[in-house]
């Protein structure tokens, strides 16, 4: 399979001199668009190698990561660094990242949250025994950082073998958290399924991300719901993630990059459109 040339050519043309990508061409590099853009290339491609060098320089000794050169505030992007480390077979970086991820949980699964749930079972839609991941340590878990962290642990386990065995327990717990937060309409919201006693509607993009995090779990009804969403008109980012998520669940999907580039491309959207779902399998 050849690379989706228009998308990859665009990404190559707007890679910054430091090896990263901004959210838009010519803007400062951030870890999120850098990782997804790098994954659109083979690991052997100089563009991906240069990107990994930058991401590696942003990883701290404890496995956390800064999201940009001038933002020293570790957050959820540590998972993305692990995904790229696995892609480049960088075992030591992957080990550090895995240790950080395994040591990070959402506030909704803290001891205090468990006590509150015991004393007042109906005060929250969360189940404290299930551990997801927050956008930033100390906050509650959300669908997107949880989905990406699951993917990171799953890919790192393939690279590290026995040294990552404990990751499987955490993956199962996090997947249970995702399943528990499913909305009544069949998809997923950003984190909650109920607000002030009212059921929340799901969104196509977060539904796709939830399904990506559930790769390997039998969730046929949710996959069918995502297929329905994919057959309808969606935002470019939602459509791109739906293609990736459905591929991870064995649903035949179009090859990456099979959509025209918009007049003024968004780097992150272009990168996900160019992403081969098998990179995350």
Image (cartoon, helix red, strand yellow):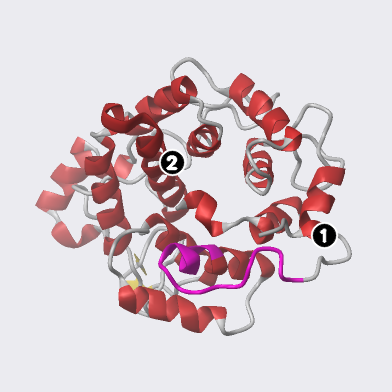
Quadrant for the N terminus in the image: bottom right
- On the rendered structure, is 220 left or right of 232? left
**Residue 168 place in picture, x, y as percent:** 25, 42
Q: Magenta part mainly helix, strand or loop?
A: loop
Badge 1 is on which residue? 6
Q: Which residue is drawn at the image coordinates 66% and 71% (left, top)? A: 235
Upstream in the sequence, badge 1 or badge 2?
A: 1
Q: CA distance from mark 1 to mark 2?
A: 28 Å
**Residue 129 place in picture, x, y as percent:** 18, 47
Q: Tell me if residue 188 comes above or below residue 69 in the rendering.
A: below
Badge 2 is on which residue? 152
- On the rendered structure, is 41 left or right of 165? right
Tell me, yes or no, if residue 20 can be seen here: no
Magenta residues (range): 244-259
Q: Which corner quadrant of the image does residue 52 belong to?
A: top right
**Residue 227 place in picture, x, y as percent:** 48, 79
How many other residues sit within 10 Å of disc 2, few (<14), some (14-19) or many (≥20)? many
Q: Which label is found at residue 234?
A: none
Between circles 1 and 2, the one closer to the viewer is 1
Q: Which corner quadrant of the image does residue 143 belong to?
A: bottom left
Tell me, yes or no, if residue 272 can be seen here: yes
């Amino acid at each position: 399979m050849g690379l989706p040339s228009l998308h990859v050519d665009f990404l190559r043309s707007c890679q910054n001199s430091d090896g990263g990508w901004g959210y838009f061409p010519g803007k400062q590099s951030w870890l999120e668009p850098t990782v997804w853009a790098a994954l659109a290339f083979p690991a052997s491609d100089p563009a991906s190698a240069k990107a990994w060098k930058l991401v590696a320089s942003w990883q701290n000794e404890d496995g956390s990561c800064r999201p940009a050169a001038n933002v020293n505030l570790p957050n959820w992007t540590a998972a993305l660094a692990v995904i790229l480390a696995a892609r480049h077979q960088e075992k030591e970086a992957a080990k550090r990242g895995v240790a950080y991820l395994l040591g990070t949980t959402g506030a909704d699964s803290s001891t205090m949250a468990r006590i509150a749930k015991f004393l007042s079972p109906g005060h929250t839609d969360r189940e404290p025994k299930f551990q997801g991941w927050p956008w930033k340590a100390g906050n509650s878990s959300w669908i997107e950082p949880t989905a990406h962290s699951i993917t990171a642990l799953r890919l790192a386990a393939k690279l590290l073998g026995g040294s990552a065995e404990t990751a499987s327990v955490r993956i199962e717990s996090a997947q249970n958290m995702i399943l528990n937060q499913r909305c009544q309409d069949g998809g997923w919201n950003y984190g909650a399924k109920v607000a002030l006693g009212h059921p929340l509607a799901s969104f196509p993009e977060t539904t796709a991300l939830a399904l990506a995090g559930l790769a390997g779990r039998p969730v046929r009804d949710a996959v069918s719901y995502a297929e329905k969403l994919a057959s309808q008109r969606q935002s470019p980012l939602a459509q791109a993630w739906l293609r990736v998520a459905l591929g991870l669940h064995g649903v035949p999907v179009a090859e990456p990059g099979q959509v025209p580039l918009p007049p003024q491309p968004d780097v992150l959207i272009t990168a996900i459109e160019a992403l081969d779902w098998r990179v995350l399998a």
